[in-house]
Image (cartoon, rainbow, N blue to C red):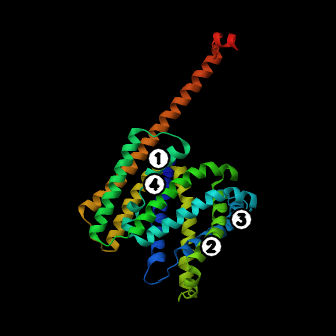
Amino acid sequence: MTESILVKSFRISAVVSAYWCISISLVFLNKYLLSSPDLKLNAPLFITWFQCVITVVCLFLLSFLGEKYPWIDKFPDFIIDLSVAKQVLPLSVVFVGMITFNNLCLKNLGVSFYNVGRSLTTVFNVICTYTILGQMTSKKAIVACLVIICGFLLGVDQEGTSSHISHSGILFGILASLCVSLNAIYTKKIIPVVDNNIWRLQLYNNFNACFLFLPLMAILGEFQEIKTFSMIGSGYFWLIMSLGGIFGISIGYITGLQIKVTSPLTHNISGTAKACVQTIISVSYFDEVKTALWWMSNLFVLGGSFAYAYVRHTEMKASHAEEKKSTIKGEEELEAGTPLVSDDKISKA
């Protein structure tokens, strides 16, 4: 028993640590690609497009790996059905918006403020769930959202006093939060099309994105930017680009694995704690000086996010218990021979 607990604890620790390392590394790597003075490549859509291409290539290779090493994961066969790709297209449009605005937000804002800049995802979850799905949200969850909004507004105000703030970065952060929320909702609607397989959904999303980005890149003149880029033939540049794509698909896998070995609530707690550490690392690395109110805004966002996750988890647990209780009661009535429909209703029928 002791060995079993020890092995389980070690596995959970390893997965959570891997999630933190991959997630934080991906944010800093994308920040370097998007706005490093060493590269000076003003083509954020091209960088994002290339990462989608790398994801498709990785899924192609993993389709062979899954057959030989099923203990890693069961990756689907690499098959592109154009009729399925067409059905997934609405989600892919939202997916493209999500990763585009996410990277544009990161390009225009510092890593330390990135978490606050796109912190309204939870708020948009509540709004979109009500407007699209017609589902109400409890007062406790709404209070948690109000705390997040306060943290966001305070953070924007304090970031503006401590440094030059990018208003476009704030706008991109808000749009990224909206797209993340829409992506979660549309994923639930579209995933049955791919047999509820998250890897197949990744394949079709990234396959569609490879084509959706091309006209956007042309409109924004990124092809000309790439043509005149001085490091286009540099092996170092393509190595960093490829590494970004590999980290991109890795975060999808390790996120699912963390939820699998722990729970959705633990995953949210882990993500919240990771965001806090990421902020501290960024402030320390870039030698940034922040006010007490700036740190307070981060605490509001992190605390509100944690509170919302906890409230939703508690509500879902209570709902599940109620459903289970109703099911057991119905089974007991059937076993006792008690009619589930009253005699009065039977006579009327």
Which of the two discs, 2 and 1, sits closer to the camera?
2
Mark 3 lies on a secondary structure that is helix
Q: Amino acid at mark 3?
A: Phe
Query: Comparing marks 2 and 4, which lies closer to the viewer?
Result: 2
Kind of residue indicated by mark 4: Thr
CA gap, disc 1 and disc 4: 9 Å
Mark 3–mark 2 Cα distance, whole angstroms, equals: 32 Å
The answer to whether residue 25 is visible is no
Q: Earlier in the sequence, mark 2 or mark 4?
A: 4
> Which residue corresponds to mark 2?
215
Q: Nearer the viewer, mark 4 or mark 3?
A: 4
Q: Which residue is mark 3?
A: 64
Q: Determine which residue is flagged by label 4.
A: 121
Q: Confirm or deny contact between disc 1 and disc 4 (CB under 8 A).
A: no
Q: Residue 226 in the image: x percent, y percent?
A: 57, 83
Left or right relative to 228: residue 276: left
Amino acid of disc 2? Pro
Instruction: In this rendered view, identify the residue nearer to me: 275 or 118.
Output: 118
Q: Quadrant of residue 66?
A: bottom right
- Which residue is drawn at the image coordinates 31% and 66% (left, top)? 159
Q: Quarter-wise, where is residue 163 in the image?
A: bottom left
Q: Say which label, 1 or 4, has the lower sequence index.
A: 4
Q: Which mark is residue 205?
A: none
Query: Which of pointers 1 and 3 lies earlier in the amino acid sequence?
Result: 3
Per the image, label 4 sits on a secondary structure element best described as helix
Q: Secondary structure at mark 1?
A: helix
Q: Position of residue 349 (x, y in %)?
A: 70, 14
Image height check: is 277 above or below 182?
below
Query: Badge 1 is on which residue?
Result: 126
Evaluate whether residue 183 shows in this view.
yes
Work out how far the residue at label 4 is from the one at label 3, CA to CA, in angstroms.
36 Å
Tell me the CA gap for discs 1 and 3. Answer: 40 Å
